[in-house]
Image: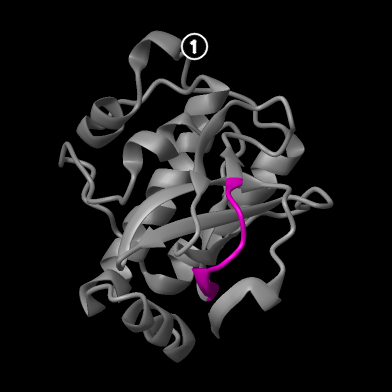
């Protein structure tokens, strides 16, 4: 893990345990398999079956659209570099806001880097399931929240960014936003 991410996690009041490679590997595994789930993949591992609804699966040989294949390739590269080996005989993962993450239409990848706008002083910012205006709203950034950029998305659409929201050091919301963040309205910056 990078020093920058460790400092950001500490600045947000998060436990240093969040920075462990196991959690990062689990998040990468979850994201990669969420992409396959959206494509209709039928999981055979206990972990895949526990996390992803079987009623939407169509088979084991599901084609991915080019941009999703690109994301899967990036994730596999990260997993290889880290030597990730998620135990798929388990039936759960400790992923923050998993219920919201499962609802995402456009799935970002957890980055090894993070930056933040701490103590947001601006107005509410709507967060959506995907990077289109018509995507359902998940929630809103509130004044006083910490806005964190800790996910990446290859070929991110202009004007859209994926943000995570912390309140009192606890992750409370995430989603896509097309509302520009004016850094002058941050109490302080991290990363």
Q: State yes or no: residue 120 in magenta.
A: yes
Q: State yes or no: residue 53 in magenta.
A: no
Residue at image mark 1: 58
Query: Residue lying furthest bottom in this view?
Result: 3
Mark 1 crowd level (few <14, some 14–19, many ≥20, 10 Å Cα) = few
x, y percent for residue 175: 54, 45
x, y percent for residue 176: 62, 45
44 to the left or right of 104: left
Q: Mostly what secondary structure, the magenta segment?
A: strand
| Helix, strand or loop for disc 1 | loop
Say if residue 150 shows up in the picture. Answer: yes
Give the quadrant of residue 102.
top left
Say if residue 1 shows up in the picture. Answer: no
Q: Residue at x 31, y 32 (%)?
A: 48
Q: Which residues are magenta?
A: 115-125
95 to the left or right of 124: left
The answer to whether 81 is drawn above or below residue 1 in the figure is above
């Amino acid at each position: 893990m990078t020093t920058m991410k460790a400092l950001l996690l500490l600045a947000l009041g998060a436990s240093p345990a969040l920075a462990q490679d196991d959690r990062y590997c689990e998040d990468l595994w979850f994201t990669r398999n969420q992409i396959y789930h959206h494509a209709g993949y039928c999981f055979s591992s206990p972990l895949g079956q526990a996390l992803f609804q079987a009623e939407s699966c169509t088979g084991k040989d599901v084609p991915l659209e080019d941009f999703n294949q690109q994301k899967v390739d990036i994730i596999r590269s990260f997993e290889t570099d880290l030597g990730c080996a998620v135990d798929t005989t388990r039936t759960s993962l400790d992923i923050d806001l998993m219920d919201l993450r499962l609802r995402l239409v456009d799935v970002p990848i957890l980055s090894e880097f993070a930056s933040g706008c701490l103590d947001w002083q601006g107005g509410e910012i709507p967060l959506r399931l995907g990077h289109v205006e018509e995507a359902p709203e998940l929630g809103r950034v509130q004044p006083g929240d910490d806005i964190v950029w800790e996910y990446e998305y290859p070929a991110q659409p202009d004007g859209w960014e994926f943000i995570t929201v912390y309140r009192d050091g606890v992750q409370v919301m995430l989603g896509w936003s097309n509302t520009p963040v004016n850094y002058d309205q941050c109490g302080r910056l991290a990363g």
